Image: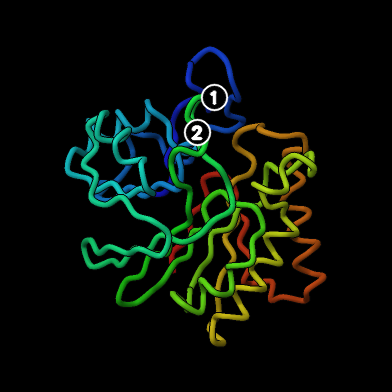
Amino acid sequence: MLDPIWSDRASPVSFVGPRRWVPPAVAFDALPPIDLVVLSHDHYDHLDVMTVRRLVRAYPNAHWIAPLKVGDWLRQRGAAVFAELDWWQATSVDGLTITCTPAQHFSGRSLTNRNATLWCGWTIRSAAHALFFAGDTGRHPEFESITRRLGPFDAAILPIGAYEPRWVMQPVHMAADEAVSAYVDILAGNAGHSCTFVASHWGTFKLTDEPMDEPPKLAHATWNSYALAATDLWIPHHGETRTW
């Protein structure tokens, strides 16, 4: 499970802040057993206190993996923190190798702890498959080097939303066209191995100024401009699942 949130708002309080446009894809009580929760950073739309408490109560034996200095916050809420990693550090759990990767973002849950904790992406590798989760990130130059070092990847989860106005958001959030260009960098390091682009970070919370339905349109247009294989782009409908 990656950056879970079941609350109605991405906010420190329940009565104000960005509200969901769509319900969670799976009702909390319909979840299968959860063994592992992996977190990219501590912003409210990625690290939600009510969701953490619900998961801890429902799945007390789940392993939690987080970037540096997020572990203390999790432990205070009862989570079984298995590992707290810096960029390029790795750990193994239940047959998976999980590596913390660079991202271009920021952190903080209040004005007093800005950038006091780390932000990151993750790679998750089993004996048969490998996944790259870019986290919440601006466009940075490390996508190809991450892939050469930790790939090849079967799928890459890349954020495509929350990007306007660009003069504010560009350092910390990729626009959909930048996400596609980052995917092209991933392909360059993927040793000829096919990789599915899985779009994330759009259409759930109204965080920025672009229309809610714009990111998929921009992603498709950019994808076509690169003449990439249509079958390698997956922008899931809300609640859609796919099995490899």
Amino acid under disc 2: Gly
Extreme residue toward the left, this view = 61
Give how far across and how far down residue 120 sits, in percent: 47, 53
Above or below, comparing residue 216 to residue 18 in the picture: below
Give how far across and how far down residue 207 sits, in percent: 66, 33
Q: Is residue 44 visible?
A: no
Depth check, front residue: 139 or 244: 139
The quarter of the rendered structure image containing the C terminus is bottom left
Q: Residues within 10 Å of mark 2 (few under 14, many from 20)?
A: some
Give how far across and how far down residue 233 sits, in percent: 64, 66
Give how far across and how far down residue 74 sits, in percent: 30, 35
Depth check, front residue: 170 or 28: 170
Above or below, comparing residue 4 to residue 150 in the picture: above
Amino acid under disc 1: Leu
Question: Left of 45 or right of it: where is 29?
Answer: left
**Secondary structure of the residue carrying numbered label 1:** loop
Depth check, front residue: 220 or 169: 169
Q: Residue 111 carries which label?
A: 1
Q: Is residue 117 visible?
A: yes
Question: Left of 159 or right of it: where is 27?
Answer: left
For the point 40% across and 59% down, the residue is: 100
Residue 224, image quadrant: bottom right
For the point 45% across and 27% down, the residue is: 7
Q: Do the residues labelled 2 and 1 touch (CB within 8 Å)?
A: yes
Above or below, comparing residue 205 to residue 102 in the picture: above
Depth check, front residue: 66 or 2: 66
Mark 2 = which residue? 108
